[in-house]
């Protein structure tokens, strides 16, 4: 019986696609992140000709369908070009410098985060849906040949320019903590979550990105921001820019606006009937008008230069913090649910 099993295993091993075996063997022969050991050795692989016995590798019908080598002290350049049956790749938490899976036409998910990647290529990965490449050293990436991508986390890299233009299936994009000066999301009609904080953006065009529900562009270099015609937008975070003007209009589902720590001299919010929370503290506003918002509950506007604060007929308003201003005209007529006003140090 043992002889039969051994014979079957040998036959199975011989049927592994030669191109796939060659590429994996080449990677396994590279030095690992553990001194004096190859990648094969840290994976405890002793026979490079029997991938069916390798831990973390799944093989079906002579082709590799999944590789899960996360957190294994691997290093070097990983290549899996034209792995036609590969659906899942996880090489996260290693010391890899490059990942190339060009032509992996059935690949759906890549986890390559927390490496030292300076190069990553996904050309021809037509079925790729989820891409995790955060905390690397990437400066460039091309996703034009991955039309089904739904999720990208490319945060904490070195990107200056990043484009996902016309990625109509993309729902979540996280590019926080890069060095972005240009971000192109034009034509991303399905994009719901955009996290682009902690970059160097001076402008952002969102026209036509009508599915957006959450935007985070904290800590950029924007001086003017106009948000208009986003019917699904619920949260806007744009604190700690250099913003002087913020205009929000025609966002019927908008709930939260946080625009603190800017240089705002003008804040206008219109046609946002669901608005509940506004934090515009630490700006240079002299006037603030937030009237007739039926669901507005909290307004934080401390540390401005406000002289006029108008919060009239805000039926649900309960709390206002307007400390450290110069208010001489404070209007709350019709805001009958107002319970607490922190208004110390106005002079």
Image: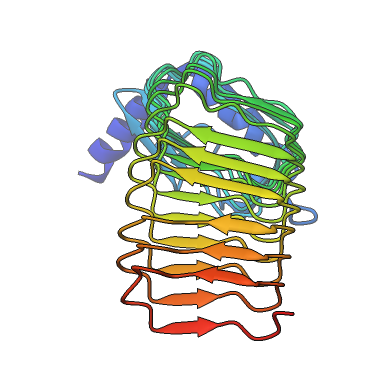
Return the residue nearer the eye: 49 or 76.
76
Return the residue nearer the eye: 47 or 263.
263
Return the residue nearer the eye: 159 or 270.
270
- 56 vs 5, left or right, is right
Q: Position of residue 183 (x, y in %)?
A: 65, 28
Q: Residue at x 61, y 50 (%)?
A: 238
Vertical order, 310 against 156 (above or below): below
Q: Quadrant of the N terminus?
A: top left
Q: Residue at x 58, y 22 (%)?
A: 22
Residue 111 can be seen, yes or no: no
Residue extending furthest left?
1
Q: Position of residue 62 (x, y in %)?
A: 35, 23
Q: Quadrant of the C terminus?
A: bottom right
Vertical order, 325 against 107 (above or below): below
Quadrant of the rendered image containing residue 279:
bottom right
Q: Residue at x 46, y 64 (%)?
A: 311
Q: Position of residue 253 (x, y in %)?
A: 33, 45
Q: How many marks?
A: 0
Residue 243 can be seen, yes or no: yes
Q: Position of residue 139 (x, y in %)?
A: 75, 31
Quadrant of the rendered image containing residue 317:
bottom left
Q: Report the colour scheme.
A: rainbow
């Amino acid at each position: 019986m043992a002889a039969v099993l051994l014979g079957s295993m040998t036959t199975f091993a011989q049927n592994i696609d030669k191109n796939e075996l060659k590429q994996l063997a080449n990677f396994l022969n590279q030095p690992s992140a553990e001194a004096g050991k190859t990648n094969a050795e840290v994976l405890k692989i002793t026979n490079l000709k029997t991938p069916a016995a390798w831990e973390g590798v799944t093989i079906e019908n002579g082709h590799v369908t999944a590789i899960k080598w996360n957190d294994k002290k691997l290093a070097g350049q990983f290549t899996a070009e034209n792995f036609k049956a590969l659906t899942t790749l996880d090489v996260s938490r290693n010391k890899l410098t490059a990942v190339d899976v060009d032509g992996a036409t059935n690949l759906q998910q890549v986890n390559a985060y927390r490496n030292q990647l300076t190069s990553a290529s996904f050309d021809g990965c037509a079925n790729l849906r989820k891409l995790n490449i955060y905390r690397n050293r990437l400066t460039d990436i091309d996703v034009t040949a991955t039309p089904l991508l739904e999720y990208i986390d490319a945060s904490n890299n070195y990107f200056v320019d990043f484009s996902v233009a016309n990625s109509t299936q993309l729902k979540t994009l996280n590019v926080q903590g890069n060095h972005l000066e240009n971000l192109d999301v034009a034509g991303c009609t399905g994009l719901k979550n955009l996290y682009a904080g902690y970059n160097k953006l001076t402008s952002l065009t969102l026209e036509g990105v009508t599915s957006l529900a959450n935007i985070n562009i904290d800590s950029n270099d924007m001086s003017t921001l106009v948000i208009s015609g986003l019917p699904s937008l619920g949260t806007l975070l744009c604190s700690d820019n250099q913003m002087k003007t913020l205009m929000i209009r025609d966002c019927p589902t908008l709930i939260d606006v946080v625009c603190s720590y800017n240089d705002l001299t003008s804040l206008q919010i219109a046609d946002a009937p669901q608005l509940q929370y506004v934090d515009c503290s630490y700006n240079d506003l002299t006037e603030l008008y937030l009237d007739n918002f039926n669901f507005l509950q909290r307004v934080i506007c401390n540390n401005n230069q406000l002289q006029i604060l108008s919060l009239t007929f805000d039926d649900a308003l309960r709390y206002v913090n307007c400390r450290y201003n110069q208010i001489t005209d404070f209007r709350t007529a019709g805001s009958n649910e107002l319970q607490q006003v922190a208004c110390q140090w106005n002079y």
